[in-house]
Amino acid sequence: MTNSIDVYPYIPNSVPEVKARMLAAIGANSMEELYAEIPPELRMQRPLSLPEPFLSEHRLKRHVQSLLAKNKSCAEALSFLGGGCYQHHVPAVCDEINGRSEFLTAYAGEPYDDAGRFQALFEYASMLGEMLEMDVVSIPTFDGHQAAATAVRMAGRHTGRKVVLVAEHVSPDKYSVMQNYGRSDLEFRRVPFDLATGTLDMGRLASILDEQVACLFLDNPSYLGVIQDGPAIAAAVHAFGALLVVGVDPSCLGVIAPPSSYGADIVCGDIQSLGMHMSYGGGHGGFIATQDDEALVMQYPSRLFGIAPTKVPGEYGFGDVAYSRTSFDKRENGNEFVGTAAALWGITAGVYMALMGPQGMRDLAHTIICRNAYAKQQLASVTGVRIPHAEQVHFKEFVVNFDASGKSVQTINRALLEQGIFGGHDLSHAFPVLGQCALYSFTEVHSQEDVATLCAALATILTK
Amino acid sequence: MNLRVGLIVNALAGVGGPVALRGSDGVAAQALALGVLPQAGARATEALSALREFGTELTVITGSGSLGADAASAAGLSCKIVYRNPGRGSAEDTATLARRLMLMQVDLLLFAGGDGTARDVAESVGDSFPVLGIPAGVKMYSGVFATTPSAAGTLAVRFLRTHTRRVRQCEVMDLDETDLRSGRIEPSLFGYVASPEDPRLLQGRKVRSGAGDAVQAQAIAASVVEAMEPEQIYLIGPGSTTWVVKQALKGQASMLSVDAYVGGQLVLNDATASALLELTAGRLARILVTCIGGQGHIFGRGNQQFSAELIRRVGRKSVSVLATPSKLISLAGRPFIADMGDRASAAEMTGYVEVVNGYRSKALYRCEAF
Amino acid sequence: MNQVMHNISLSRFTNGRANLRRYHQARWDEPVIFELSQRGERGVLVPELEQEIAVATNQALSGLPHGMLRTQAPRLPEMSQNRVLRHYLRLSQQTLGADLNVDVGQGTCTMKYNPKINEQLARDPRMSELHPLQDADTVQGMLHIFHQVHALMMEVSGMDAVSLQARSGSQAIYGNFAVLRAYQEASGTYGVRDEVITTIFSHPSDAACARLLGYRVITLYPDADGYPDLDALRTALSPRTAALIITNPEDTGIFNKKIRQFTDMVRAAGGVNIYDQANANGLLGITRAREAGFDMCHFNLHKTFATPHACGGPAVGAMCVTQELERFLPSPKVVLREGSYAIDDAGPDSVGKVSAFMGTGSIVLRAYAWAMNLGAKGLREVSEIAVLNNNYMMHELLKIPGLSAPYAPGKRRIEQVRYSWEKLHADTGIHSEQIGIRAADFGVHYWTSHHPFLVPEPATIEPTESYSQADLDEFVDVMRHIAHEAYTNPETIRSAPHNCPVHAVDASVLDDPKRWAITWRGYQRKLRSQEAKQSA
């Protein structure tokens, strides 16, 4: 058996006779001649040192599967992890469409040969626009964190102010992304949340706001799952001429009021919940939305697709709106930068929203709120467990406190893992003020039985 | 869509070229006598034929006969005549027709001719509405000309099709033909007109839209003003990009003059070469200039107030060229030219010059001197 | 009745070469999805609430703050499942994916084959159903793959440490600048050394990301041979120099022989060297960032390492740095400890996060599978054939009247060439962009160039290793045919496309704030307001 071949299935012209024929056609004697421009001292003098390859598709498949077998997925375990990435049912049609060769392998064609890509992304923006009740939605950014980072930069450019307020109960990772991305031009200040309610501390907000403030950023529902008083927050922020930038999980919008309805100026978030598998963080895409205010539209760095007539009556065409905003057009003089991000997930989110329809989106949000309410009730009755913000309405997740058990979240999660349960995300490092707390997430995939399984497991572990 | 395109054909443009008269101003009769056939009308027709795709939605507004109507009809376009003139075109015909077209508020003014025609047009219409030159003359130093008649047609179509009608300020240059014929070359900057942006630089899907060069000029000006040192003298040359800087500072200056500023305040208006020497004696100074699009001159064209002696004194490192990336690219790799007529200052200017091309953004570009 | 059997293939070839295809793309004339809505139809159902939960939570919404309950249902389309599927299948057919065409025209994008087995593996539930916050013990396979791809990137670049957190090439450029900033902050030079030098041929994101992180940008223009100008670099260097960011080869495909001089000069001036390796497809196992004197580089896994472009993401940009810069890489990092993998916080000097979680894990897996199928010899074959294909293509394309390859005449190019239709344009008035659109009538397309257009009437062609000689010939034949049309029948080009799903778009509305519509609701709103005005 040899582990060396000459002809590679992915490389048609690796056939030696073809290679020779093409070299002859261009008047070259050897492959080396083609690299004549690279000085010898820069040439690698040895072969790359890499593992032996699995040349046949079968062997490769077995190898990778053997690695995948070392994973234990949320399909096998019972998982209560959330914190920005969520386990949902992904409709089969979503996978069917994003697995289509045409979409999967397209890239930067024109609105003509890629008319379908443009239309699908326009429809994605349009359906999300209906969910958000906003007229402008961007082509997806990298993830919801990036969307938030860009949204506050947009607010800074729009207002000409430099101070960005960020609620303390946003995901620490999201804050890190925002700060990294913005701090060369913006000054970040934090607004605390009320430990008792898990909502933004309105008193502290009022004392921090002034006329240097470009915007307030908060998630609603928050990172801790609480649905907060949007109208009150908007009124406070707008009183100082600042913008309200809200991060929202679009899957709550069948029941929860869209941020635009209470006055949010820029709305952003992540679309992973709209038909994407978690894929170890591979399912994320971000959105940014505003009303159709020209001054605000000109602040987007992302591409925006618009609908336009063609020279044939009754035919829809599409194209880039106000392209001159972008770095593609103006390099360092454009807004931020633009490039490949998460377009396929935009198309998929469109498929998801079309499948769900208004009733499906309402059912989804409603069932998630109810399942969280039910889980809160059930968990509260487990000895050693306390639900700190129990009186609030939670969407998708809530904080569970284990101080009374005398056990750390780490210990508890380790014990749960032994029973095939992924406990909630440990918050004790990022939010030490909350004590030994974890963020437990429940979606439409968590049945009554799953909740019972969790409670039983916790009851055993906490009383040990 | 009811489009109105103004047209001026200088029928005699270019006739001096073939018989080495280096221009046609005032020597047309001489050239015609030598048997030269006028080509400007045919060149205008070539450009205009691209406009046929607008069909009945477009009307050409022009003068009778060889002033434009002939060329428009030959291109199959319908036209409206607003100036009837019995004879061959003259500078007066160009100017009169241009003024009438301006009153008619045409969407675009096309003219076929050379630098002399461009000058006549510019003097009549200023930079108030978009003008595009169909190259048909002997000298075409001005940036208002498309590269070929058919390129002029393509550019006109694109411009008329876009909503935003993006324009840029183009120099109108001319050499004095009397001097030229006697061997002296002294091209001067006569003014600016607004012209459609060159599609070679900014094309199609990625082009349309926005304010283009105007926004970049603002960014350049902001960067320059932000970096100004309070004690230093700033000598700011003529041009559309430098004009944006002057407008951001205090005092009444003009687009075509060299002006001096200290601490953001105008201290010398429309300065002469000797006044500049006097002002800068023993003091730190910085020169801000633009470059002539497509040609690359930074000194010696329209800004002769910057004398060889002044440039030697100030030095290359204290010269900033204000130019958008598209202007640099219009040079197609050719260096800047400092036409000083003086060996020592030429040596000083040979090398790399700083170009401010955006906000906190600059390029380094080669300069050669003569 | 004629009983003769026809040799059909005879009329498909001329002198042994295939004739141009009589191609037409699907044209479904598909409505916008909202127009397909039928009230009451459902596409997919949500798991119903168990009776007990429903009863226990019937007051679940009563605690909502005032104004937080949605009052109007979202006006999404209402459609049965198969109708949604059919709509999107039609849109997919109206999209010219790389799998369908000889996609050599999207230069700089490296449109290579994305093997289907990798797709299958990435969609395995043991990959797709992994939550990014799972305990390291439950994702040992995934972490092994991250670790191995780190090693692969290190070997291919010669760098010492890698982060795969960035979700695209541009985000990796941004991430590398964030590392530069953190490094400068640690050494007290941030704000002092505040100038980043780049070249006009480098990707727009190089300059844009530098600005984003507070740097001033100095752009170098090429010398007469198309190389970045070494003398200009010398003039640009100063005590304010923070870094050089440069591509090699640049989009012209010409390898910059003096690259080591560039990096040496920058280092001597106290600056950091950053290599944008988006154009790496011709260089695997041939030459590396380290030997050329770079401190940082990045690769686009969706280009060089064969993961799908997906209409523009998801993707991964691999940030690679030297040991000196390792401690500044994003957090967390994957480490191998006592035979098992762990996820560690990257420490106090780390830039923190550049994207959510650990980036796009499923893309990392695809790149891993691709490299493990090819091995060292295969990767080198990839590069060699990519370069051979490119030089063959250039040789054939330059036979077409009106087309040229500016700069460095007669020299071999690496993986792509930026061509110019300048002569054709001067002769015919036809623009490069119009040729690209006309090409779509034959089932291929190409891209011009980033802005600004330094090469007039540009077309950037990158054949990669994935196309056969006959494929390349077919693309050349399309170009030859269109060039001929430009000289003989330019109107056909001006009025293109003819065989695409849609015709020429009236782009003027896309720049007009009164008429642009970025969503269907925005479109409807503007139409209504126009109607209201007209009737008033």
Image (tube, coloured by chain):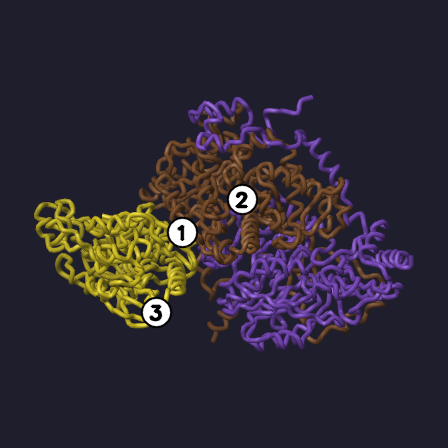
Chain colours: A purple, B yellow, C brown
Question: How far is mark 2 from mark 1, CA to CA?
Answer: 37 Å
Residue A250, label in figure:
none
Residue B203, label in figure:
1
Identify the residue position indicated by label 2 in the image.
C295
Tags 1 and 3 in contact by the CB under 8 Å rule? no
Q: Residues within 10 Å of mark 2 (few under 14, many from 20)?
A: many
Between circles 2 and 1, the one closer to the viewer is 2
Are the residues flagged by discs 2 and 1 from a single subunit?
no
Between circles 1 and 3, the one closer to the viewer is 3
Identify the residue position indicated by label 3 in the image.
B264
Q: Return the residue nearer the eye: C205 or C533.
A: C205
Which image quadrant: the C terminus of chain A?
bottom right
Q: Return the residue nearer the eye: A69 or C254.
A: C254
User: Hey, what amino acid is under mark 2?
Assistant: Asp
Give x and y (percent) for residue A419: 86, 50
Q: Chain of mark 2?
A: C
Question: How far is mark 1 from mark 3, CA to CA?
Answer: 38 Å
